[in-house]
Amino acid sequence: MASLLHIDLATLIQTVGYLGIFLLVFADSGLLLGLVLPGDSLLVTAGLLASQGHLTLWLLMLVTALGAILGDAAGYACGKRLGPQLFTRKDAWFFTPRHLDRARQFYARHGGKTIVLARFLHGVRTLAPMMAGAAYMPYGTFLVYNMVGGLGWAISVSALGYWLGYALPDLDRYLLPLLGGIALLALFSTLARLRNKPR
């Protein structure tokens, strides 16, 4: 079963190619599909495939970085356009003007590091750019940190998969537990950040 799931993910990447990787990363970054897409696992597997000669590492990193940066930009645009409408509804239980005001204060103080760190947290990387747009974080500031986070994530996670492909022989048989561990680590780090967030 483990090898079947690994083959499915690896086969998906090889089938969709660089364009498919770009679209999956774009959706993971800028659309609400990012809450269910396996962004980190996808990149680790793609890096592993690059170590086996199925993909070119520098091109993988470039395509992934572009998908991440443009995806976040799309998320920011959606948040800026739709956020104020969501946060002014009188019957809302969460999307209230008070929450929008708190988000604006938070992004004014911590927006840059939030955009960079959120890139490495599953689910949060989808919501952070949307909240930045809704909170009217200046786009020039957002763009700088978006590029730093997108490049850092694309390069480091792809390189991790590439390095693992060389460092661990017969990684194929251990890939599913490894990807499960990465997913759990991302989930726990996200939950820890949310739990420790000041109220």
Image (cartoon, grey):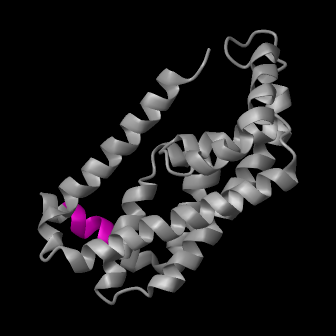
In which quarter of the view is residue 71 placed? bottom right
The residue under the point 12% across, 57% down is: 1
User: What x and y, as percent, mark residue 183?
Assistant: 34, 47
Residue at position x 81%, y 34% in the image: 108
Quadrant in which the C terminus is drawn: top right
Is residue 153 found left or right of 115 in the rendered image? left
Residue 72, x across and y down, in percent: 68, 54
Residue at point 79%, 41% (across, down): 133
**Nearest the camera: 179 or 8?**
179
Segment tinted magenta in the rendering: 5-11
Visible in this render: residue 44? yes
Horizontal side of 140 relative to 39 (left or right) equals right
Image position of 88 with respect to 167: above or below: above
- Can residue 11 be seen here? no
Badge count: 0
As displayed, is residue 187 above or below residue 98? below
- The answer to whether 84 is drawn above or below residue 123 in the figure is above
Q: Where residue 10 appears, x then y in whole percent?
A: 31, 72
Residue 35 is covered by the magenta coloring: no
Q: Nearer the viewer, residue 58 or 8?
A: 58
Q: Is residue 7 magenta?
A: yes
Residue at 82 percent across and 16 percent down: it is 97
Q: Is residue 117 left or right of residue 96?
A: left
Seen in the image, is 11 located left or right of residue 67? left
Residue 27 falls in which quadrant of the image? bottom right
Q: From the viewer's side, name the closer residue of 163 and 139.
A: 163
**Main structural element of the magenta stretch: helix, strand or loop?**
helix
